[in-house]
Amino acid sequence: MSTALDAFISTALAAPVPAEVHGIAAALASAPGTVAVLFYGSNLRTGSLDGVLDFYVLTEGPRERGLWPRVGYREFARAGTTLRAKIATMRLATFAAAAGGLSIDTTIWTRFVQPAALVWTRDEAARTAVTGAVAAAAITAARFAAVLGPEAGEAADFWRALFRQTYAAELRVEAAGREEQILQHGAGRYQALLPLAWKAAGIAFTREGERLTLAIDPQERMRWQALWARRRRLGRPLNIVRLVRAAWTFEGAGAYGAWKVERHTGVRVPLTAFRERHPILAAPGVLLRVWRERRR
């Protein structure tokens, strides 16, 4: 692993976050076996506490059975305000393997090449392990950016090509130009990160000002293009299965759905015991209630 890349990632993971985020992270860390808590997403970029805060809880213990991560939703009362959090939970070892590109999954390394804050760790060993995993995510993303992007261009050209391809492979519904928003917000970050990650990956390139020119062996390029083709082919089926699974295993789905309905329609949906236990079965009744209320 590159010392320069490690230092860059370590500094980035130490990004300041609101005290409320630290408080939620501490509450999440109280679960047995928790090793680290990461905070990421648009709220990290903006500093806002509105909407849903995104956390990854990394744990120790036996290997997951089936797909990962396990996703849930919780609400926290803080100083008279309700803060909402979506929490993904998985083993640190699984997270590290996925970040390093050792599985067909693309979601971990594409998500964590973007900004994240390491807001809680059990000890220094955990901090080192998470930093190494996030650095590995940067290397994996940079490798694919090298073969999905142009042979020469500015850093943004390579990242733009990567994000467009991963959105398509993951069946993610993103507004047009979403990759531009990401790049514009963290322009300096991505400009600095790409050459660091390429050096750590052993990818040859030259630099003239902001223009980067790759010198990848043709066989190596073909190998990574084949690896990407497999991920692109299997990415959509994998994420469809994840969505179906999440529909039945999303912890707190009833409360999350009720909040989303009220936020987007203005119609308050009381969270009954049935709706909390069976959010999928309750959905038609909720939609009917929203329709009637909006007609009034």
Image (cartoon, helix red, strand yellow):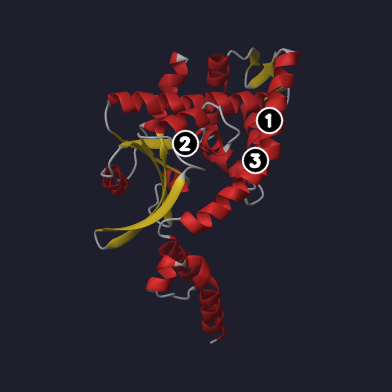
| Residue density around tag 1, few if under 14, some if 14–19, many if 20 or more, within 10 Å | many
Give, as a three-letter code, the residue at label 1: Trp
**Mark toward the start of the polypeptide (2 vs 1):** 2
Give the Cα separation between the discs numbered 3 and 2: 23 Å
Q: Can the viewer see residue 218 in this picture?
A: yes
Give, as a three-letter code, the residue at label 2: Pro
| Residue density around tag 3, few if under 14, some if 14–19, many if 20 or more, within 10 Å | many
Q: Are marks 3 and 2 in contact (CB under 8 Å)?
A: no
Residue drawn at point x = 62 percent, y = 27 percent: 155
Residue 111 in percent (x, y) is at: 52, 38
Whether 64 is drawn above or below 23: the answer is above
Give, as a three-letter code, the residue at label 3: Gly
Secondary structure type for disc 2: loop
Whether 179 is drawn above or below 219: the answer is below
Residue 24 in percent (x, y) is at: 30, 48
Q: Which mark is residue 228?
A: 1
Judge depth for marks 2 and 1 and give the one in front: 1
Relative side of 1 to 118, left or right: right
User: Which image quadrant is residue 60 in?
Assistant: top left
**Mark toward the start of the polypeptide (3 vs 2):** 2
Residue wearing tag 3: 235
Q: Which mark is residue 248?
A: none
Secondary structure type for disc 3: helix
Q: Which mark is residue 115?
A: 2
Residue drawn at point x = 66 percent, y = 45 percent: 236
Please name whichever residue, 109 or 8, is drawn nearer the observer in this view of the structure.
109
Residue drawn at point x = 71 percent, y = 20 percent: 223
Please name whichever residue, 189 or 14, is drawn nearer the observer in this view of the structure.
14
